[in-house]
């Protein structure tokens, strides 16, 4: 499972405070913890005003890279910022994100085309988030064409099926899981990723919705998630699910992660 | 979700001690807790020597029925005991279990044919547990024929796909989920049930394997589980999964169970 550590995000109140107060220790700790919990990428999202965003990203990226070898996931709603921000990174990481909205892809794909950078692509466009899986798959096909025209291999794409609130949905996550299955059928090399917080918005005990959501999406073919890897229960369920889905021979990864203390304290 | 409360089982050491010591309070408490946590059935398994089994079942059933209106799941490896044991029960419940092994079905189906009793049926026979899903489905078809010949409606059957240890499996739970999907395709009215403890045998942190297992089986079509309903995390994940699978309109069941305190203490 490709885990994108979500904790260094200015939309999380504690992280926002740390950013505002230039609290280096706080940011370094988040990087260290997520790195130790086996994040494949560490997401960096400034969530500040546009004129301060680039300098804030630089400050965050420098701190993360001082603590960890894990590649950066550059997270911004402003597609024009990535071309400068990737220069702060010691190694190729993940752009988070593009979509068929506006000219995002046309700004980002040329920048990463001849690099080792990967890219999250959301299945939405100028009309917003499509209602049906079929419409989302159409957007996927357009994204795939754009990637091909820039010679970006599909394996460098992390497709986000786009998740809305469960509490107002009529068919649960059927649209999301159908989208995942279709996208993987059309192009097996692409990765599928998602965050887990939108789904549980406005519901109590959100953690249970989030955990079951990730497991159900994994069974549909999702192989990446934007989560807190230091959340031991979530991480243990992800390792358990990989084993149950037959992707962990003899449960060696599950047992290894347990022995390394990733699921909580190991009793002597 | 049809939950079969598993706690009154003599193979659990604490319950075995309570049975040996005739500790009425202990058994009554297990009945009360599982009933409050919305068990659909309360399983009663004596796990004592054959000559003591019937009297032990009676003692247990009487205690459960003194505390709860929830129907009994009569659990025994001895098919010949059910004909006497159902007489102790105030209302029809669940026989747990028959299979195509020996003459179990031929002993039990005539006894429950003209009653309201339901029945768990395991997909194994005299050769043991079949390797493939296709072979398990063949056993299912034989069980279905036997049920038809006794005019037992398929909706009264709880099919158990039979779960083996994950740590020695080669393809995870693919055989189990394929069996579930096939059985539900052949005969949608049947229920599918399973326990969650065999799967995690010999692995550390078994609870995570058990929880992810139930969620993945639910996504394949399982609608019943033999678990501890007073386990708040497991119960919350089950309610969350039902909502995510689109079986809980506007998440009203999930929210209701939360408000009733079934997922842990509700903050004022």
Image: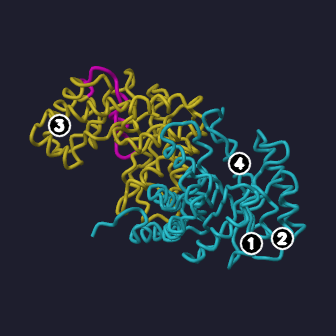
Chain colours: A yellow, B cyan
Tell me which segment is drawn in magenta.
A86-110
Q: CA distance from mark 2 to mark 4?
A: 24 Å
Q: Which residue does the image show at 16% across and 31% down from the upper left? A: A59
Instruction: Classify mark 4: residues with Cα within 10 Å, few (<14), some (14-19) or many (20+).
Output: many
| Left or right: residue B49 compared with residue B265 | right
Q: Position of residue A201 (x, y in %)?
A: 36, 59
Q: Are marks 2 and 1 in contact (CB under 8 Å)?
A: yes
- Nearer to us of marks 2 and 4 is 2
Q: Which label was assigned to residue B162?
A: 4
Instruction: Classify mark 2: residues with Cα within 10 Å, few (<14), some (14-19) or many (20+).
Output: some
Q: Which residue does the image show at 40% across and 31% down from the upper left? A: A268
Q: Which label was assigned to residue A26?
A: 3
Note whether B164 is above or below B79 in the view shown: above
SS of the residue under disc 3: helix
Q: Are marks 2 and 3 in contact (CB under 8 Å)?
A: no
Q: Are marks 2 and 1 on the same chain?
A: yes
Q: Position of residue B53 (x, y in %)?
A: 72, 61
- Nearer to us of marks 4 and 1 is 1
Q: Are marks 3 and 4 on the same chain?
A: no
Q: Are marks 2 and 4 in contact (CB under 8 Å)?
A: no
Q: Outermost residue toward the right? A: B149
Q: CA distance from mark 1 to mark 3?
A: 63 Å
Q: CA distance from mark 3 to mark 4?
A: 49 Å
Q: Which residue is mark 2?
A: B111
Q: Are marks 3 and 4 in contact (CB under 8 Å)?
A: no
- Nearer to us of marks 2 and 3 is 2
Magenta stretch: residue A12 in it? no
Q: Which residue does the image show at 38% across and 32% down from the upper left? A: A261
Q: Which residue is mark 1?
A: B86
Q: Are marks 1 and 3 in contact (CB under 8 Å)?
A: no
């Amino acid at each position: 499972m490709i885990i994108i550590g979500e904790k260094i995000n200015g939309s999380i109140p504690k992280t926002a405070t740390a950013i505002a107060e230039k609290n280096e220790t706080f940011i370094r700790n988040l990087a260290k913890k997520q790195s130790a919990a086996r994040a494949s990428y560490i997401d960096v999202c400034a969530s500040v005003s546009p004129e301060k965003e680039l300098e804030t990203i630089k400050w965050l990226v420098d701190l993360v890279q001082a603590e960890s070898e894990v590649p950066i996931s550059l997270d911004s709603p402003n597609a024009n910022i990535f071309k400068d921000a990737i220069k702060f990174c010691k190694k190729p990481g993940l752009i988070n994100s593009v979509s068929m909205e506006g000219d995002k892809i046309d700004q980002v794909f040329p920048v990463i085309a001849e690099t080792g950078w990967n890219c999250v692509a959301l299945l939405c466009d100028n009309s917003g988030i499509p209602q049906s899986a079929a419409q989302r798959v159409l957007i996927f096909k357009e994204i795939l064409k754009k990637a091909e025209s820039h010679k970006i291999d599909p394996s460098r794409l992390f497709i986000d099926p786009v998740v809305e609130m469960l509490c107002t949905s009529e068919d649960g996550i059927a649209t999301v899981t159908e989208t995942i299955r279709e996208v993987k059928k059309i192009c097996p090399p692409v990765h599928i990723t998602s965050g887990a917080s939108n789904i549980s918005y406005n519901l109590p005990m959100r953690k249970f919705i989030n955990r079951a959501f990730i497991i159900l999406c994994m069974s549909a073919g999702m192989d990446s998630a934007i989560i807190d890897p230091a959340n031991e229960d979530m991480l243990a369920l992800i390792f358990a699910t990989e084993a149950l889905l037959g992707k962990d021979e003899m449960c060696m990864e599950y047992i290894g992660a347990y022995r390394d203390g990733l699921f909580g304290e190991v009793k002597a």
